[in-house]
Amino acid sequence: MPSSRIGLGLVFVLLFLLGLTIGNRHWIGDTIANLPSAATVREWMQPPADLPLLTIDMPFANYSLLLEKRTAAFATGAVLATPNDFVNADIRLTQNGQTTTIPVRLRLRQGPADWLVEGGKWAFDGQTRQNTVLLGLQQFSLQDPATNGWLNQWLFTESLAEAGILAARQQFVQLVFNGEAKGIYVLQTKWDMAALAAQGREPGAVVGFDTARLWLARGQFDGDWAAALADPVARVSLDDYRLLEVATERDPSLAQDEVLTAQFEGAVGRLRQMQQGEIAPAAVFEAAQYGAFLAQVDLWGAMGAVSLLNTQFFADPTTGRLEPIAGNGSPLADPEARIEPLHFFNDPQIAAAYVQTAVSLTDPAYVDQLEANYGAAWVQLNKAVAAEVTLEPPWDALRQRQELLRRTLEPVEPVLAYLGPPSATAEGVVEIELANRLTLPQELVGFQFGESLFLPMEQAWVQDGEGVGENGRFLLRATPPDSLPHYLRVRIPLTVLQNANPPLDDLRSFDLFVVTRLVGLENGRLLSLVRPGVSVEPGQ
């Protein structure tokens, strides 16, 4: 029966061609004239010489399981991945004229269902089998680079790794899935002991947040993130760590190692304690590392890297503290994107590290050196992906973002400040009420009276040592969104002014400024004008 159907099909094709020939005797010549050249066909069929070719061969039964997962994703709007979703396949790696076969396990990657359109570039998580590696990786993801910024993401992760920050390194490849060419993909590191060792870390646990609720909320609003995040009741947030469960699903390899299991459970416990306000963020994170990471993210506008969708942390086995792992960030996608105040965890140590790193990143020499180190590699990779995308070099965009960071480090009038009531003067003091407007903490340096007199801040001017930090400096705590500013009362004895050089006798003839600097800086002066106060009687 099948052979007879094939025969009938051939007859119909021959009759169709005969009709075309009779109706238009020139059709064959016209068609041949419009065919692409042999060189063009070879270019279509073969990947660029500098991109490895990955050919995935998946048995039909296993592919059917992926299709079932895809159908379920369309029902909810999201792929919710589990360890049981992995199915066996083989990947044939062709590179430098050599082909090797690597046995793997693949699953659809957790994320939005609209990634799974017919004929689209589906995203996968993968693991090698039988102790093999794929381009140096045993755990990996495969995804469309268009979802993540193409070469900008590559350069972002390379710059982070150079700075000693854990980053999901990536490599561009050509992909064929069960005989269908899918175009250029990005092969990205997934975190296991080998990946940690490759970036100079001891074996340790990796933890993060359970993002299922976020993807389901997006699906509920038909894939519209803006609508889901704007819901005034549900409080769906990509940034607020207080509103999302810590993920307790662990790598199966941890079950074989009691030490790593204990590290994982300890890290999960500390994140939960931080969520509940029981311990300070600086007791959970490597503050210097995390602050530096935030500054890099801010320079690149890579907000996806601090989103709860992508955030992961490595538990340092020596200190027990967590280091950030930079994942997908979509760097330079939005020229105005900035980190949110929540990302500082309202912690002065993290904020100080952010400021210190931001200062170095705003140096013009930083981008100049980045271009010198990676410019040639960027050009080479750009040629390799040019068949699918036209990209602009990132250097000018980075220099523009450097200017944004510079302005962040030089805020205008960062302190709210008022003179106290006249009754304070009668008591022999100048009273000033002041509070930090910023989401970054500040150090209170002193007070500037006109142009001639500067008085450094003294501990005797505050009650019971309020605002005095561990290092003897005076801290003005940050004011997070939805919080009231915390006011500090400073009382400067009039005798200090009268004995100054030059002495001050009449405050009304001078402008008075509060002098501060961002925590983390050793130099710099930020000035805020002290406004006249208003006397209000009790009960009014």
Image (cartoon, grey):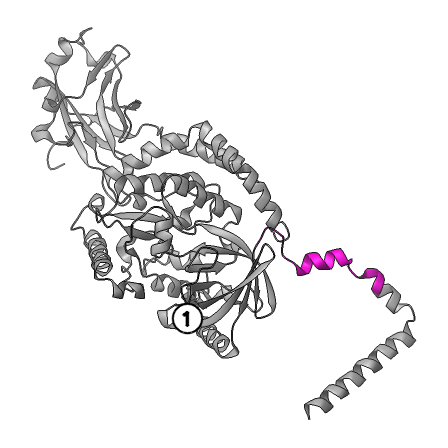
x and y percentages locating residue 70 in the rendered image? 47, 72
2 relative to 182 in the view: left or right: right
The residue positioned 34% from the left and 64% from the top of the image is 213
Is 46 located above or below residue 19 in the figure? Answer: above
Residue drawn at (58%, 64%) of the image: 176
- Left/right placement of residue 285 relative to residue 145 reads left
Give the mark count: 1
Q: Position of residue 445 (x, y in %)?
A: 22, 23
Report if residue 40 lies within the magenta region.
yes
In magenta segment, residue 89: no
Quarter of the image with the N terminus in it: bottom right
Picture quadrant of residue 29: bottom right
Residue on which disc 1 sits:
86
Q: Is residue 323 visible?
A: yes
Q: What kind of element bears circle 1?
A: loop
Residues shaded magenta: 32-51
Left/right of residue 168 with respect to residue 314 in the rendered view: right
Eyeballing the image, is 475 above or below 495?
Answer: below
Q: Nearer the viewer, residue 175 or 283?
A: 175
**Neighbourhood count class around disc 1 (C-alpha, 10 Å): few under 14, some 14–19, many 20 upward:** many
Give the residue at x 48% y 71%. 89
Left or right of 347 in this view: 23: right
Residue type, label 1: Phe
Position of the C terminus, as image quadrant, is top left
Residue 276: x %, y % from top left = 19, 54
Residue 391 visible in this rendered orientation of the protein: no
**Front residue of this view, candidates 57 and 343:** 57
- 348 and 100: which one is in front? 100
